[in-house]
Amino acid sequence: MTAATVSLGVAAPASAVAEPRRPIPDGVFALGVASGEPRADGFVLWTRLAPNPGALDGHGGMGKEDVPVTYQVATDRRFTRIVRAGVAIASPELGHSVHPEVRGLQPGREYFYRFRAGAQVSPVGRAKTFPAPGQRGATFSFATASCQAWYHGYFSAYKHLAARTDLDAVFFLGDYIYEYGIVAGGNLWKQGVTVGPEHAVEIETLEQYRLRYGLFKSDPDLQAAHAAAPWLLTWDDHEVQNNYGNNTSYYGIPPELFPYRRAVAYRAFYENLPISLDSLPEGPDLQLYRRLDVGTLARINMLDGRQYRDPVPTSEADRLSESRTILGAAQEQWLYDGLRNSPATWNILANGVVFTAVTDDRVEQWDGYPANRKRLLAAMGETSNTVVLTGDVHRAIASELKADFADPASDTIGVELICSSIGSDGDGAETDAYAKDWMAHPYMKFYNARRGYVYAQITETEMISEFVKVPYVQADANAVATVAARFRTPAGAPRLEAL
């Protein structure tokens, strides 16, 4: 055990359990609990002590003292069979968050976890390990979600997602928070709530990012979804600033100053989410792309489409440049190698922006990086059963991936499942004015503009995917979810067959 693991809230010696000098405030687990990064032998646990998430100093009502937090992992919800336990230090430097990494567990089984700080015990969370390396015959059930503008609506889709009992993982695909100022009479569409003036400005500092995460994570349905299954997360743009890419601000922050904005945003991202110590940011840099295997059933590639991308093209010649990249050279090569050498039946790419070709003016999507898309399509053609998981556009869309989008007769080499938003853009509609642009392409198979998420289950022979929607989100959190569309994708012939 190193000093770094103690100070970073990963592990601490048993002697650290001594009570802090000052009493621990009541309600320290107001932001809930979470797990993430599931592996065959364990996962990351998370909580952040914050009895007052709205405290303006960014410390959540905890002051500036270290607090020992114990954790337990059991095979039953009543914790009669505890298999792992330990201590982590919640420090003010990381917003009193802890990220203990639990290892030595059995593959492919369900576990339960909880935390204790002083006399206070957290809610119980559920996690599940992945199958062992090389294991065949597994089933993998997951959900995807993105774009949760708290001020646009209630997170009732999460209420339905959290009630599922078969989830192995949840993929979150970007825009966990939004940086915009929240203004009553303006963008505050969620009925029955108010926010203080501290939220009326665009967030720029670490303290403001912590406040915004505290506001969003106060939602009980989001907390329930975190507690229901381990999460795998990537980001898009609003975790920092709308439409940013690399060190380029869409709103004119000078390149020499924008790294500070990235640094504080990335720090808050790490503090508030169940990601591993490998993703602890170093200033304006955070290692987010990574790979996980689900036995031999699926290889998961978590992508980062923001940190290394080239700027928005300034001309059509620029857009078509062969050198343009959305992933960066190092991540591209890492991804292609992982696809071409994959032992898995299914190859999943969890990604922040739409991959399918739609229209040339969507330069924030992969449409702005056609050379990079062509290279990736070539790599997909050398592997099996590619599934791209995407969010961002606040619509539920299903698309078949063509080896050459300009040639409808070219081979179908995979599918893209685009989840709608959880709350962003309010209630939405069954369809809207953008539908004609998307559905003009024969490879587009479904479009819906309500809020919701995607659920999927994969086996060695097929993937069944469901697009779940809710009829409204602005009025209250009681909307009833229904399945808007259901598809079968056969292994070996990855297409979308409507069910």
Image (cartoon, grey):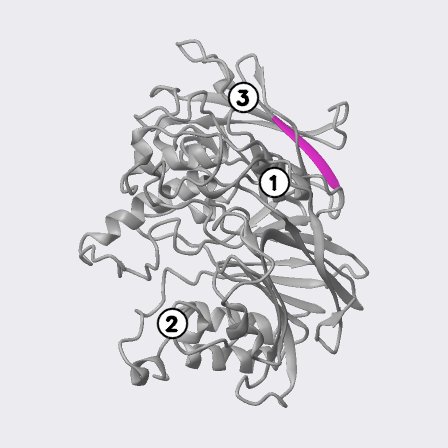
Q: In the rendered view of the protein, which quadrant contains the C terminus?
A: bottom right
Residue 151 lies, with reference to residue 82, above or below; the image says below
Residue at the image position 59 percent from the left and 23 percent from the top: 122
Residue 100 seen in render: yes
Whole-percent x, y for residue 445 in the image: 65, 72
- The answer to which of marks 2 and 3 sits earlier in the sequence is 3
Residue at the image position 75 percent from the left and 77 percent from the top: 492
435 or 292, which lies in front?
435
Residue 133 seen in render: no
Mark 1 or mark 3: which is in front? 1
Judge whether residue 258 is colored magenta: no
* Mark 1 secondary-structure assignment: helix
Asked whether the residues under the numbered discs 2 and 3 touch, taking CB atoms below 8 Å apart as contact, a structural biologist would say no
Residue that numbered label 3 is attached to: 14
Stretch of the chain drawn in magenta: 110-114
Rounded to the nearest angstrom, the CA distance separating label 1 from label 2 is 31 Å
Rounded to the nearest angstrom, the CA distance separating label 1 from label 3 is 40 Å
70 or 62, which lies in front?
62
- The answer to which of marks 1 and 3 sits earlier in the sequence is 3
- The answer to which of marks 1 and 2 sits earlier in the sequence is 1
Is 423 on the left or on the right of 103, as rendered?
A: left
Mark number, residue 363: 2
Whole-percent x, y for residue 170 in the image: 62, 49
Q: How many marks?
A: 3
Mark number, residue 156: 1
